[in-house]
C-alpha cells in the first residue's frame, strides 16, 4: 500500500510537540495543548491545508478546546505552511523541495459549464453519502474484527509483528504486480483536441504504458497501482470519463479497499486518509460513469469522484467540518461546499447507526486507555443514575500526617493517580487531595521524619523533624523546607514507586502532607445526577473525583473506569436486579 501522509504526519507533529514541551510545561493540560497544536501542524504539512489542520485538531485532536488554543493552533499552522513555502523556494546541491511532492488534488476545471453540478444532483450526492456510510461501517467492523484477531495472535510478540509486516508486504507486492499483468487491454491515450488543460496534458503523460505501446497506449490498472497515490487520485479527479473503464474501476476499488482494511493496524506508519480517498475516488468515478451513461446531462464523473472520496472517508472517520475544509483547500473550488457538507453529514449519520468511527474503535481497543466520549449515552441519562450509585465505595485515602510505611504500601498496591486526604481526627471530613507523583517525590527526597515530644508553653506537644521538614502538627503555619516549586520542576519525570528505597526504620517515620495537598479539590455530591457528574469529569479533565455527603465526608471516589459505558451498564444491571 502507498505510504500516506496524514497518519505519520499527525503522529510526527504530536511527537515534536511533546519533545519541545517536555521542559516548558508544568502540567498535563499544557502538554495536551502542545500536542493538539502539533497535530494541526502535521495535517497542515501533509495536505497544505492550514485551516483544515486547525479544524482537525479541534474535531479529533483536542479533548478540551479554548480560545487560547485556537490562536495557538492557528499560529502553528501558519508557521508550518510558511516553512513549506520557504523550503520550496530554496535550491541546493541536493535538489529542490517542490510542492508536487506534497499531497494535492489540483484545481478542478470544468468544460462548458458555469457550475460544477445541477441542483437536482444534490440528491445523487445524498445517495453517495448513504452508500459511503455503509461502506465505512463495513470497513470499520471488518477492521475491528481483524484487530481483535491481531491482538490475540500477533501483537504480543515483536517477532510475529515483524513477520506479519513481511508477509503482508510480500502479498501486496505480488497482487499489485499481478493485477496490471493480468490486465491485457491497452487503451489508446486520448488525443489533444484543444479541450485539454495544461494540467490534464501533464497527467496524460504520467499514464503508465505497462505492456503497451509507449506514448500511444496505457494500462488502466498499472496507471492506478504503479503510480503514487496522489497521482492516482488526480487521474480519477481530472481525466475524462472514458479514461478508466467500469471493469477497471470495480476491480481497483475492491482490491484497494480490501488492502486498506487488512493493512490498517499493522506495525508500519500509515493512516486512513489517502487509502480511503483513493478507494472512494474510484467508487465515485464508477458511480459517475454509470449515472452519466443513464443521463448525459449530469455533471462530469470528476465531480462524483471527489464526492465519492469524501463519502467513503466520511463513512470511516465520521469527520464533518475539518474534512470539508481540507477537501476544499486541496481542490481550490468553493463550489463543492454544499455537496461535501451533504455527503459528509449523510455518511456520518448512516455509519453512526452501526458502529463508531475507526479512530475511536482503535482507542477503545487500546488496553489501559479509558476514553470518555463527548456526551453520556442517552440510555444512561434516562435511568436516573446518581453519583452515589456510580462511585466506587472502596476509598483509598491518606491522613494529613501519615506514616511512610502506609503511604508506600498504598502506592505499591494500587495505580491510582490521586488520593483523598481525610482528616480522621475531625469527623473524617475531606481535607483535600494529593497526587501520586507528589507522594513519590516526597518519599524519594525523604521529606519525612520521626515524631518527637517537644516542650512548648509548659506542655509537651508532638512535632515532626527531619532534614526537610520542621512542623508542629498543632500549628496551622507550615514551614516546609521542601518547596512545591521543587516538585513542579521535576515534571514530567517524576519518580515512580519502583525508584523508592524505604528501610524498616523509614516506615515508622511520618510525612506531613498538609503543605502539599490541594485543599480546594473538585468534589461532587452523592445525590448529583450521573449526567452532571460525567460532564464535570470530562470538561474539567480531572482524574479522580471525590464523592461527598452533606457533611463533606468522603463516601466514594469516581475515576474514568467508573464512567466507561461498560461500567455504567454493569451498574444499571445491578440496580435492576435489586429492584426486581
Image (cartoon, helix red, strand yellow):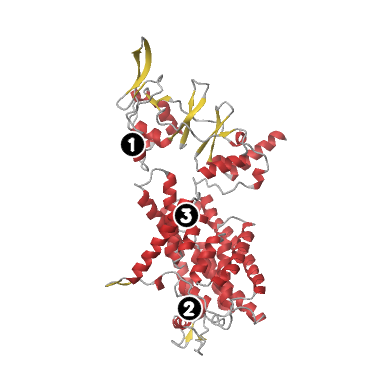
Q: Secondary structure at mark 3?
A: helix
Q: Residue furthest top?
A: 458
Quadrant for the C terminus in the image: top right
Q: Residues within 10 Å of mark 3 (few under 14, many from 20)?
A: some
Location of residue 463 in the rendering, given as x and y in whole percent from the top left corner: 36, 19
Is label 1 or label 3 in front?
A: 3
The residue where tag 3 is placed is 70
**Distance between mark 2 and mark 1 Cα atoms:** 62 Å
Q: Is residue 341 visible?
A: yes
Location of residue 485 in the rendering, given as x and y in whole percent from the top left corner: 35, 36
Q: Nearer the viewer, residue 494 or 36?
A: 36
The residue where tag 1 is placed is 486
**Distance between mark 3 and mark 2 Cα atoms:** 42 Å
Q: Earlier in the sequence, mark 1 or mark 3?
A: 3
Q: Earlier in the sequence, mark 2 or mark 1?
A: 2
Is label 3 or label 2 in front?
A: 3
Asked if disc 2 and disc 1 are in contact, CB closer than 8 Å, the reply is: no
Q: Nearer the viewer, residue 18 or 564?
A: 18
- Number of callouts in the render? 3
Q: Secondary structure at mark 2?
A: helix
Asked if disc 3 and disc 2 are in contact, CB closer than 8 Å, the reply is: no
**Distance between mark 1 and mark 3 Cα atoms:** 31 Å
Residue visible at 53% across and 66% down? 276
Q: Residue furthest left?
A: 93
Location of residue 315 in the rendering, given as x and y in whole percent from the top left corner: 58, 62
The residue where tag 2 is placed is 223
Asked if disc 1 and disc 3 are in contact, CB closer than 8 Å, the reply is: no
Q: Is residue 259 visible?
A: no
Query: In screen coordinates, is 471 left or right of 216?
Result: left
Location of residue 285 in the rendering, given as x and y in whole percent from the top left corner: 57, 75
Amino acid at each position: 500500500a502507498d505510504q500516506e501522509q496524514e497518519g505519520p504526519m499527525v503522529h510526527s507533529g504530536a511527537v515534536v510537540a511533546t519533545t519541545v514541551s517536555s521542559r516548558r510545561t508544568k502540567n498535563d493540560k499544557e502538554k495536551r495543548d502542545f500536542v493538539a497544536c502539533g497535530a494541526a501542524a502535521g495535517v497542515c504539512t501533509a495536505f497544505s491545508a492550514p485551516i483544515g489542520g486547525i479544524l482537525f485538531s479541534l474535531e479529533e485532536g483536542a479533548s478540551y478546546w479554548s480560545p487560547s488554543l485556537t490562536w495557538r493552533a492557528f499560529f502553528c499552522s501558519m508557521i508550518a505552511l510558511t516553512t513549506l513555502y520557504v523550503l520550496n523556494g530554496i535550491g541546493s546541491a541536493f535538489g529542490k523541495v517542490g510542492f508536487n511532492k506534497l499531497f494535492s488534488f489540483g484545481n478542478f476545471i470544468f468544460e462548458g459549464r458555469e457550475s460544477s453540478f445541477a441542483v437536482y444532483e444534490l440528491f445523487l450526492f445524498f445517495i453517495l453519502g448513504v452508500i459511503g456510510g455503509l461502506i465505512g461501517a463495513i470497513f470499520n467492523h471488518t477492521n475491528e474484527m481483524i484487530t481483535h484477531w491481531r491482538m490475540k495472535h500477533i501483537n504480543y510478540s515483536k517477532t510475529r509483528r515483524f513477520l506479519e509486516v513481511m508477509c503482508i508486504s510480500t502479498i501486496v507486492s505480488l497482487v499489485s504486480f499481478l493485477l496490471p499483468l493480468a490486465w491485457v487491454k491497452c487503451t489508446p491515450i486520448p488525443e489533444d483536441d484543444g479541450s485539454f488543460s495544461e494540467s490534464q496534458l501533464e497527467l496524460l503523460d504520467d499514464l503508465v504504458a505497462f505492456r503497451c505501446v509507449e506514448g500511444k497506449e496505457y494500462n488502466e490498472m498499472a496507471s492506478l497501482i504503479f503510480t503514487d497515490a496522489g497521482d492516482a487520485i488526480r487521474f480519477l479527479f481530472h481525466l475524462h470519463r472514458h479514461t478508466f473503464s467500469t471493469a477497471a474501476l470495480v476491480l481497483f476499488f475492491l482490491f484497494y479497499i480490501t488492502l486498506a482494511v487488512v493493512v490498517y493496524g499493522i506495525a508500519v506508519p500509515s493512516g486512513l486518509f489517502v487509502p480511503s480517498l483513493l478507494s472512494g475516488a474510484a467508487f465515485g468515478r464508477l458511480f459517475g460513469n454509470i449515472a452519466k451513461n443513464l443521463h448525459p446531462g449530469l455533471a462530469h464523473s470528476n465531480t462524483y469522484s471527489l464526492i465519492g472520496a469524501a463519502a467513503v472517508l466520511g463513512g470511516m472517520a465520521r469527520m464533518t467540518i475539518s474534512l470539508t475544509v481540507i477537501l476544499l483547500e486541496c481542490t481550490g473550488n468553493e463550489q463543492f461546499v454544499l455537496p461535501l457538507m451533504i455527503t459528509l453529514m449523510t455518511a456520518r449519520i448512516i455509519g453512526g447507526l452501526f458502529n463508531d468511527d475507526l479512530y475511536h474503535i482503535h482507542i477503545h481497543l487500546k488496553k489501559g486507555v479509558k476514553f470518555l466520549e463527548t456526551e453520556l449515552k442517552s440510555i444512561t441519562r434516562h435511568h436516573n443514575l446518581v453519583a452515589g450509585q456510580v462511585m466506587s465505595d472502596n476509598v483509598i485515602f491518606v491522613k494529613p500526617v501519615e506514616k511512610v510505611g502506609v503511604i508506600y504500601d498504598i502506592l505499591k498496591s494500587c495505580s491510582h493517580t490521586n488520593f483523598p486526604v481525610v482528616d480522621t481526627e475531625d469527623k473524617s471530613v475531606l481535607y483535600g487531595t494529593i497526587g501520586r507523583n507528589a507522594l513519590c517525590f516526597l518519599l524519594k527526597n525523604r521529606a519525612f521524619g520521626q515524631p518527637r515530644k517537644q516542650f512548648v508553653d509548659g506542655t509537651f506537644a508532638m512535632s515532626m523533624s527531619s532534614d526537610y521538614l520542621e512542623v508542629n502538627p498543632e500549628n496551622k503555619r507550615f514551614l516546609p523546607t521542601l518547596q512545591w516549586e521543587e516538585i513542579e520542576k521535576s515534571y514530567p519525570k517524576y519518580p515512580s514507586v519502583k525508584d523508592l528505597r524505604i528501610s524498616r526504620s523509614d516506615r515508622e517515620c511520618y510525612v506531613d502532607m498538609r503543605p502539599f495537598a490541594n485543599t480546594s479539590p473538585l468534589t461532587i455530591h452523592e445525590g448529583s445526577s450521573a449526567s452532571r457528574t460525567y460532564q464535570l469529569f470530562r470538561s474539567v479533565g480531572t482524574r479522580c473525583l471525590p464523592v461527598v455527603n452533606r457533611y463533606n465526608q468522603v463516601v466514594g471516589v469516581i475515576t474514568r473506569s467508573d464512567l466507561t459505558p461498560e461500567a455504567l451498564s454493569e451498574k444499571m444491571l445491578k440496580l435492576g436486579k435489586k429492584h426486581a
